[in-house]
Amino acid sequence: MLVFDAKIKSVFLVIAGLGLASGAAHAVDGGGSAKVNVVSPLSITQSQELNFGIVAPGVSTGTVAVAVGGAVTQGNTAVYFTGSGAQNGAFDIVGDQNRQYSIALPASASLTGGGNPILVDGFISDPAVTGLLDINGLQEVRVGATLHLPSGQATGIYTGSYTVTVLYQ
């Protein structure tokens, strides 16, 4: 009887195995698609240097602000502004046509030269927060800021750098 039981068990296992295999044969696949739109990378190039002109320190710290349109404002009478060479900064943005981008400005920068560093802050831009590239993928961003000139600042030419960041929206 043992031999007979072993044969029945073998047949049962084979049938059970076929049943499992036939379940796998009922699997179906679904196809999907993928897509990407690669656009021109953004680039930014300074086209005009931000320049505070010629200033003279007063008896207390004073400020000189250059607006995005190039107008110069003296913050108090402690700083004498002679009006020579002041101009807003400007950057050319190039990228994919008709695309919106965001603009990030620095909190501050330092100008170094003949004496202690000079603080520049209050950066502003036009456009202010976001820009839109034109049909040719171009736009100009103008930048202004405020210079804080301490009393007794050593004479000399002071220079520095700052970063304007643009990013597609």
Image: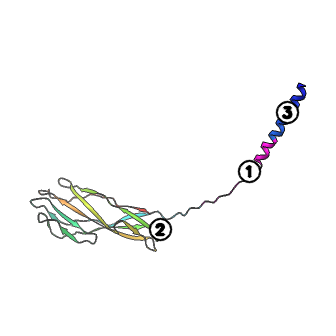
At x 42%, y 63%, the residue is 43
Q: Looking at the picture, how far across and down is residue 116, in whole percent?
A: 18, 53
Q: Residue furthest left?
A: 59
Query: Of label 2 and label 3, which has the lower sequence position?
Result: 3
Query: Of label 2 and label 1, which has the lower sequence position?
Result: 1
Mark 2 is on which residue type?
A: Asp
Q: Looking at the picture, how far across and down is residue 131, in whole percent?
A: 39, 68
Foreground pick, 54 / 128: 128
In the figure, is residue 61 to the left or right of 49? left
Spatial separation of the CA atoms under disc 2 and disc 3: 70 Å
For the N terminus, the image quarter is top right
The tag on residue 36 is none
Q: Looking at the picture, how far across and down is residue 162, in whole percent?
A: 30, 58
Instruction: Say if the magenta span includes residue 71.
Output: no
Foreground pick, 142 / 27: 27
In the figure, is residue 66 to the left or right of 4? left
Question: Which element is circle 2 on?
Answer: loop
Q: Residues within 10 Å of mark 1 (few under 14, many from 20)?
A: few
Which contiguous range is marked in magenta?
18-34
Give the residue at mark 1: 27
For the C terminus, the image quarter is bottom left
Question: Which element is circle 3 on?
Answer: helix
Give the residue at mark 2: 96
Give the residue at mark 3: 10
Instruction: Say if the magenta span includes residue 23.
Output: yes
At x 84%, y 36%, the residue is 12
